[in-house]
Image: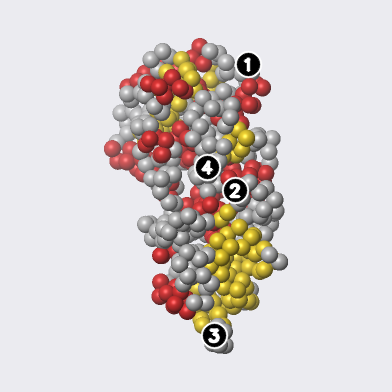
Amino acid sequence: MREKALEGDIIKDNEVPPRRAFDLYSYRVVPWWVAAMLIGLPRAVSHAWVDTKDRESVWTHINGKQWPVSLPSGIDPRLLRNEWLNEGCQYVWVDVFCLRQEGGLREDLRVEEWKLDVPMIGFVYGAPARLVWNAGPIICYLSGLGRPLSSNVDMTSDRSWFRRAWTLQETSTDCVIAGLTDEETVEQLEYLRADIQNAVPPLAGLSFFTTIPPSLVMRVLSDMQKRVSSYPIDRVAGLAYIFQGTRVPGYYKSHTEEEAWLKLWRVSSLECRAQIFFFFPQPGRGEQKWCPTWEQVLSEELPIVECDPTEKWYGHLYYEEWHPGRPFAFRGHCIKDGHVCGLAKEDPSVRVRSGELRITDGSGTTHTFRISANHQYPIPEDSYELWGTSGQGSTFTSFREPRALLKYWVLGYRQGIKFEKFSTFQITEEDERQRLIKSGLAQGVNTEGERLRTDLC
């Protein structure tokens, strides 16, 4: 299975299980299939590595002394084992024991294993896999692996669990806070548990079996801006499982962040691509105009996307991987000539700016609609080509989200057969959207199943 999982530098399947598991009964690392055959998915352990000066490398027979196990100073693996046994675990997955680490006997083998094993860490922590395999809640250490829970966890430290890039995908609504002492009160524990669950609210309950909320991508990217990692590329790699592609980029530490970022969008879900298209307020400065560069993601203030918590996202942005030369493309509804005004200047005193969209129909009558922008990027008063959301699922389904129909918009210019993005706005008022729908000014809206397609710059 593993030998065939990588196709070039892309992992073909997002459900490749971990390579190893820690068998607590035999006190050694075993192949994953041993645990899968007996219990299913091992319990996942989440932690942030402490600073190098506060940890030590241990050579242990647990992993056959194949690589040094990095543990916080003074932590005994036997005590970790006892703690996990007391949690009712037979098998666990924790990176220091189950993922081949640097400094071991086979550095060449580590490089090869990491191409597949590092991106698929998200599978162990993901809600879908834990649901299917009936795995228990994630065991979470906030003060370092095996360390007692500090009563004053420093959430601002670069070594904080709340600030590491990899722990973003480990955020879960169900978790067991480990390392408890007699000092913690019920109120303190509930406060910490709420911090974990609210770290990135859109991730709560997220699974491959449900559609994603419109606020997901911007909220996740905004959170990742504040996180740190040992290697710069890790902040990109830590997003792969969250963005729900059926394929996942392999892990190559030699790749630049921009290379990894573009590769991520080529395999991410159609819905997540569409969110970056509709919500990032500027054109990309790199190879793709529809998508920002990674440098833009890290440096720009990202908009807050407000929506009904029950609203689902059905916008799709396509990339035909079987035709590598083909550009990204979007299917939705189009207004060929819309005049946008009132958004040309920044207004830091408000979070959402108000403007107008004016469209002239075939008879010469001008229709005016109230619009808004949840960002400060200036949109000069001008006529633009506009693309709006259909609220419809994939080409092969009839599922619709009426609340998203013509709600989110991208404006830009026609460059030959391609559309070049300039900025974004929304029509948030339901009565305004209904007027636009009934007017027939947006192409394809009143024709069942008909959506227009455009290639993107």
Disc 3 on helix, strand or loop? Answer: strand
In-image side of 186 versus 435 (left or right): left
- Report crowding for label 4: few under 14, some 14 to 19, many 20 or more residues within 10 A (C-alpha): some
Determine the CA span between mark 2 and mark 3: 39 Å
Disc 1 on helix, strand or loop? Answer: loop
Residue marked by disc 4: 246
Determine the CA span between mark 2 and mark 1: 35 Å
Relative vertical location of residue 160 with respect to residue 322 in this rendering, above or below: above
Residue marked by disc 3: 366
How are the residues colored?
secondary structure
In-image side of 21 versus 376 (left or right): left
Depth check, mark 3 against mark 4: the one in front is 4
Determine the CA span between mark 4 and mark 1: 34 Å
- Which residue is drawn at the image coordinates 50% and 45% (left, top)? 244
Relative vertical location of residue 280 with respect to residue 179 in this rendering, above or below: below
- Report crowding for label 2: few under 14, some 14 to 19, many 20 or more residues within 10 A (C-alpha): many
Rendering coords of residue 342 (x, y %): 56, 77
Q: Are marks 3 and 4 in contact (CB under 8 Å)?
A: no
Q: Check disc 2 and give the amino acid type.
A: Trp
Rendering coords of residue 263 (x, y %): 63, 44
Residue marked by disc 2: 265
Rendering coords of residue 24 (x, y %): 40, 17
Pick the residue in front: 197 or 387.
387
Determine the CA span between mark 2 and mark 4: 12 Å
- Report crowding for label 1: few under 14, some 14 to 19, many 20 or more residues within 10 A (C-alpha): some
Q: Is residue 247 visible?
A: yes
Residue marked by disc 1: 105
Extreme residue toward the left, this view? 186
First in sequence: mark 3 vs mark 4: 4
